[in-house]
Amino acid sequence: MSSPTPVQSFIGGIGLSLPVHALLLLNGNVFGISGFVHRAVLGGKESICAVLGLILGGAYVGLLEGHGPAPFQLGVGRVALAGFFVGLGSKLSNGCTSGHMICGLSRFSLRSLVATITFFITGVITVQLLPGELPPTSYMDWSLGPYGKALLGSQLAVSALLCSFATRNWSPPKNGPEPRPNSRLLVFLATGFEFALALRFSNLSESERVLSFLDLPFRPSFDPSLAFLAAGALPTSIILYHFFRGSEKPLLGERWSIPQGAPVDVRLIGGAALFGIGWGLAGICPGPGLVNLGRALTNGSGIVPVAIWLAGVAIGGLLA
């Protein structure tokens, strides 16, 4: 039996928006974790650094907590199929919960709005159709959690590092700064690490908590924590993007790689629907998957199911 964590999830949502904006400001990139995974599989150095940052962040959490993620209460086949649908769907729709729900909605992207609505609908339907009952939730936990202060302090330290990068490069030449590839790689690594800390603090790295949200409010198992995360992440991300994105010239060079005006099409809707099915099958998407891999590796428990799920994501992306 789990307890909804409104304070942790709300503050964690605010925390997620900080590395998202840092990556935008410094490198000009969307913090889209499924995209990181798909490009890392193909050997993209920057994406590999982002993936590594998320895994290392999870490993740090595992060391701090002294245990791995809660084990999947699912068969191996369902875990693999869930990963495959998440990988295939996120590649077709060009995004997942981080790229569409946080980054895209903060830009008021119509594509991201349609994708988010679609994968929530298919996620909810999938959970409703699956056999079995999720355990009922307990009372609201209004605390910061046993490791909240440590996670917040660690995230503030990483944020300070990223702020130092920003302040040192705040006045680039008129035509934009010269590319600084090594600094860009470090930013991908650091923002991935920071995102992992905020995600774990929010408690939405746990698959059962996500499934309990998708089970809808009329069920005793409903857990509203994901709504509190969104209430923290979206307003903060909207404010940062619309009022503090600067000149749209990345401070560490290269181009401003933010999607502009692509159409809403069948590929987007179909991909988002498949992603939602995969999300509903196991309650996990690429960010939590990578963070949980780090937690599992640190403690030597639960490695195989997470690895199988991530392998499914990679294969789905390659076949899209």
Image (spheres, rainbow, N blue to C red):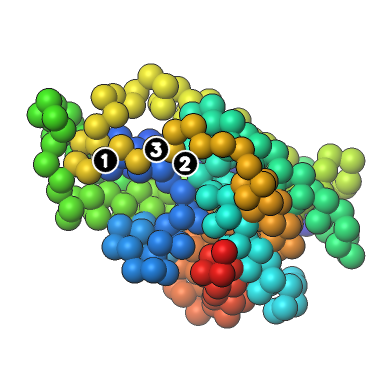
**Label 1 amino acid?**
Arg
Classify 10 Å Cα crowding around label 2: few (below 14), some (14-19), many (20 and above). many
Contact between marks 1 and 2 (CB within 8 A): the answer is no
Examine the rendered structure and indicate whether residue 52 appears above or below residue 296.
above
Considering the numbered disc 2 on the image, is that residue within a helix, a strand or a loop?
Answer: helix
**What quarter of the picture does the N terminus occupy?**
bottom right
Looking at the rendered image, the disc whose residue lies closer to the viewer, 1 or 2, is: 1
Query: Which sits in the foreground, 146 or 77?
Result: 77
**Label 2 amino acid?**
Leu
User: Which x, y percent locates residue 142?
Assistant: 64, 37
**Label 3 amino acid?**
Ile
Distance from the alpha carbon under mark 1 to that under mark 2:
23 Å
> Residue at the location (10% across, 29% down)?
173
> Residue at the location (26% across, 24% down)?
247
- In the displayed structure image, the side of residue 256 where residue 121 appears, left or right: right
Looking at the rendered image, the disc whose residue lies closer to the viewer, 3 or 2, is: 3
Examine the rendered structure and indicate whether residue 66 appears above or below residue 141.
below
- In the displayed structure image, the side of residue 54 where residue 177 appears, left or right: left
User: Which x, y percent locates residue 246?
Assistant: 28, 24
**What quarter of the picture does the C terminus occupy?**
bottom right
Mark sitting on residue 255 = 1
> Residue at the location (63% across, 68% down)?
84
Of label 1 and label 2, which has the lower sequence position? 2
Name the residue beneath numbered marker 3. Answer: 258
